[in-house]
Amino acid sequence: MFNFIWGVAFVIVNFGLFLLSYRLFGRKGLYAWVGFATVLANIQVIKTIEMFGIVMTLGNSIYASIYMTTDLLNEKYGAKAAKQAVWFGFFTLFASAIIMQMVLVFVPQEGDISQEALRTIFGLAPQIALGSLSAYFVSQFLDVRVFSALKKRYPAYNQFWLRINGSIGLSQFVDSLVFCSIAFYKVYPLNVWVQILLTTYVLKFVISAAGTPVLYWARSFRFREEEQD
């Protein structure tokens, strides 16, 4: 029960910081959010927890917010802006994976206390990074494409919820399938792998759906530089 209560608080904090980043920095804040969210999600996913007897990984909350960010960019600034954010996140994830692997190669001095901790966190990085990069690349561009298609088919202002959940529902399933197939290949037994796959997808979709009112609120934000554009 503690993990559930703490998890709800965790989601609220993630949504709050997402809104704050956009409110304070406008469109640039959304790009910044995509950048560090991809890195944090890649670190958090290493930790597994149990909730209601089901094994799941962390990282779902902040990773779901990336889809929310690209959908908000697509809604307010167009598909080109959303694709740019996807590429920005992809580069951030790629660059951080390379840098941290190089960090691990350095020979630590005798009194160092961080090498083993870093190795524990980033030791699976090549496999997880490959899974993250592949899943991110495929699912994020799919999300942009599906959202754009739904925007043409259902362009009404009050149909924003349909565009959000329709695109995220499909793209997050593809993301979960690709990521778990690569990142956790031979890492967990099949029954645990299936639990992680299903809980990862369901959690991300539920979190994204819960974030729909947050996106409606964010869409109402107005910035002086946008008015000048």
Image (spheres, grey):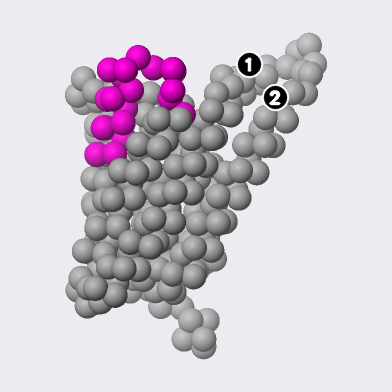
The residue range painted magenta reads: 183-202
Res. 119 in view: yes
Res. 23 in view: no
In the image, is residue 53 part of the stretch drawn in magenta? no
Q: In the image, is 50 to the left or to the right of 121?
A: left
**Disc number at residue 229?**
none
Vertical side of 77 occupied by 206: above or below: above
In space, the residues marked 2 and 1 are separated at their CA atoms by 9 Å
User: Which residue: 77% across, 18% down?
Assistant: 108
User: Which residue: 61% across, 43% down?
Assistant: 94
Q: What's the residue type where badge 1 is placed? A: Glu
**Disc number at residue 104?**
2
**Disc number at residue 116?**
1
* Residue 73 in which image quadrant: bottom left
Earlier residue among tags 2 and 1: 2
Query: Please, what is the dominant secondary structure of the magenta stretch?
Result: helix
Element class at badge 1 = helix
In the image, is residue 200 part of the stretch drawn in magenta? yes
* Residue 109 in which image quadrant: top right
Report the front residue among 89 and 22.
Answer: 89
Report the front residue among 164 and 44.
Answer: 164
